[in-house]
Image (spheres, grey):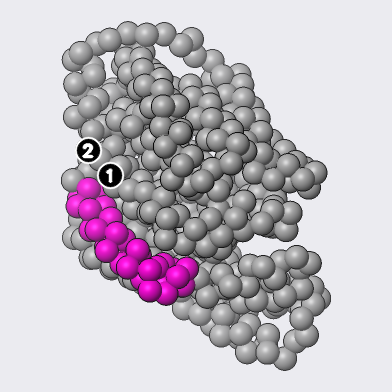
Amino acid sequence: MAESSEHLDPTSEISLEAVKSRAVKGIVVLTGRTFVVSAISLLATAFLTVFLEPAEFGVFWIVSAIVNFLAYFSDVGLAAALIQKKEVPQDKDLKTTFLVQQGLVIILLLILFFLTPTLTRIYNLSPEGRFLLYALGASFLLSSLKTIPSVLLERELEFGKLVLPQVLENLAYNVTAVILAWKGFGVTSFSIAVLVRGITGLSAIYFLKPWVPGFALSLPSLKKLLSYGVPYQANTLLATLKDDGMTVVLGTILGPAGIGLLGWAQKWAYAPLRFFMDHVLKVTFPAFARMQDAKADLRRSVTRSLFFICFLVFPTLAGLLILAPILVSIIPRYGKWEPALMALSLIGINTIFAAVTTQLTNLFSAIGKIKITFKLMVMWTVLTWLLVPALALKYGINGAAAGYALVGVSSLVAIYIARRFIKFSILESVVRPFAASSIMAIALFFVRGFLPLSMTSVWFLILLGIAIYGASIYLIVGGSIVSDVRKSISTFFSK
């Protein structure tokens, strides 16, 4: 028993205790050290929405969706298979993955080039729009070159190193985009920014995790990786169809301006997820994969990681929805986004459920239950394609947002299925932070009605919200929350 508690299996790179330690530190480090950068990213978005028009944002959303859809076909799940693989990947595994991926990327870039005239005609793209299309294609190539070093760092749960390239490329992208938009470059601001981001991230990752690119073709290795990678990538395809594919379709229904408004609502409604959840998912996927045979540890880790996500996402979303009408009214040149406020609230419903179910599908993928994830993705994709376009045709952007909200509610099915495999505590992980966030939201909504429209009121509501949420969560959870915060701070500053 002592041996099994120390190592997951004889071929494991790191022990179970190291997995748990690095996972906790990885979550804290990724969240803490990128918090400021995420704030800068949101601040940059605020500036961009001032300097650019909804139609310009719409072009960016549509073109990005096209490239993201093509990017799905560039990996066939091999990177995820390398991360999930129990045994230590051999050099032939890495080089075979690199060869297959780069070959697919080149083919997809050629397809993008030949499709450009057709896409230009369908979406009435300007020369700036076509340049953005090519820039995103080049950025896609640069991103693919980072795959192997990133996989190696993720398998080792070395997220302190992995986060630095993300920090640098996000800073480079946001600073470049804001400056160029301020100078009047319009859509071209995005084009130059994505190229700067790609070069910066590629340089940083190879500096931190040197790996000599090479090509190999091991058919046994490829077959084994594809046995997991293909089902995994099928889920990614469905997610791409559900999200980016739907954006492409909505572009023909709502037009660039409508997509710009809907994209603004989605950007801010999903911001709490980008702030907090993405970091946890990146850590817990390889960590859960290493805990596949340690059920008790896995159950506790799922409960704690869900609590961490909900503890941060729920109050942030509630505060955002309360403050959005004030900010739209008082920020100069920001009134043009007022038509998207209802959509923001509706998509917020989707965010609440996504905070829970995204981690659960991440769990299924990590422990090899990839078929369950696939079935759930089929359900969500079908519902999205049935509800969102139909409601968008009838009610515009608010109809599309309502469709996304209804899809979010269907996530209750995923929670039910997950509980059959891992008996995590819904009360501890989800209900308690939701209750505390609801108390805060009700109080702020009531107080907001008595305050003038000013930045002073915004800051007062933020501070009041922090105080109410802190008191509520303490009363609901107990003193353990204080201990957890202290441990997180200690972990963040530890070597």
- Residue 377 visible here: yes
Given contact means CB atoms under 8 Å apart, are the residues at marks 2 and 1 in contact?
yes
Task: Answer few, some or many: residues within 10 Å of disc 2's Cα (few below 14, many 20 plus, some between 14 and 19).
Answer: some
Q: Quadrant of residue 208?
A: top right
- Taking 368 as reference, is 16 left or right? right
Q: For the C terminus, which image quadrant?
A: top right
Q: Which residue is mark 1?
A: 235
Which of these two is toward me, 471 or 227? 227
- Residues drawn in magenta: 372-401
Circle 2: element type: helix
> Would you say 269 lies left or right of 288 here?
right
Q: What separation in Å lies between label 2 and label 1 (alpha carbons)?
A: 7 Å
Residue toward you, 120 or 105: 120
If the image is split into quadrants, where does the N terminus sit? Answer: top left
Check disc 2 and report the residue beneath it. Answer: 231
Which SS class for mark 1?
helix
12 is higher (above) or lower (below) than 5: above
